Amino acid sequence: MNKCLLSGTDKSKYTGDITWIDSPSKFTWTIPLDRLSINANPVDLGSMNKALIDSGTGSILGPLNLVDEFYKSVPGAEQWPGFPGQYRFPCKVVDTINVSLTFGDFTVNLGADLAAYESTPAGKTEPYCYGAVMGSKAYETNQLYNWVLGDVFFKNVYSVFRAEPPAVGFATLASKHDVPVDPTDLRPINDSSNLYSTSKAFDATDANQTDTDPNDSRLRDSTAGRAIDIATTAVLLCLCVLTALHF
């Protein structure tokens, strides 16, 4: 179960000290991402190293070119046909994958959480897992942030948000509750910006589900749900900011 605690921290939920990463913005929880690696292979971030810490997103989003490079280190990974920036790979390799993100002196390890959900695609004879790290060209040129770290990230670290001075704090979880990310949060939206929605537009419980038709009306009909999600998230974030910690 996810919890949002206002005006304090629950020391029973984490161990050690909180590592604070200063945020250059007073309007978004954006911090520098110093290192991203998969199976000890670093991704060259260059100037695309600004990460938005966002509880309103289900997956991890980033620049298309860097995500393409990222999946080269996943055995058997291939692009999901028709959806640039989204990848799938044989589920049998999940336990061999380790993804780490480093902020200052603190590193968050994702491990098998790179796998969002599984199905057997058309033409395949074994289950494939769909990656929770997705790419979009929009993030290659975004001036505010290049990465969006959502629920897949949050479930692996204790996070604290400080209003003044603006900073995000991380600590090691006392125990990790293995709560799977809702697979319907991770479906791509086929629109002009090639961004991704957190709207629950699909029923992904069918184990025989195959590749999605980009023209599926369920994709187009998710717009209203996405707007509601965004509005709700904005209200919650405002409440958290107004009552955030002052250290």
Image (cartoon, grey):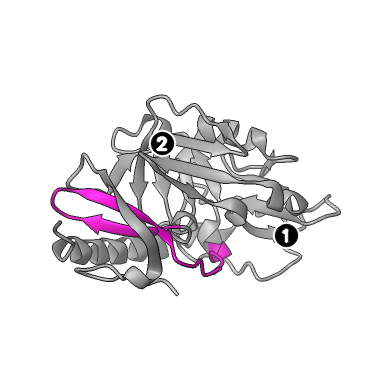
37 relative position to 169: left or right: right
Q: Quadrant of the N terminus?
A: bottom left
Classify 10 Å Cα crowding around label 2: few (below 14), some (14-19), many (20 and above).
Answer: many
Please determine whether, in this image, residue 176 is positioned above or below residue 76: below
Q: Nearer the viewer, residue 79 or 180?
A: 180
Which amino acid lies under the numbered mark 2 shown in the image of this protein?
A: Tyr
Disc 2/disc 1 C-alpha distance (Å): 28 Å
SS at mark 2 in the image:
helix
Q: Residue furthest right?
A: 125
Is residue 193 in view from this perspective? no
Residue 156 visible somewhere in the drawing: yes
Q: Residue at x 14, y 59 (%)?
A: 246
Q: Tell me which segment is drawn in magenta.
A: 157-184
Residue neighbourhood size for the residue with mark 1, other residues' Cα within 10 Å, grouped as few (<14), some (14–19), many (≥20):
many
Direction from residue 7 to residue 130 in the image, left or right: right
Residue to which mark 1 is pinned: 119
Magenta highlight on residue 89 = no
Residue 139, numbered label: 2
Q: How many marks can you see?
A: 2
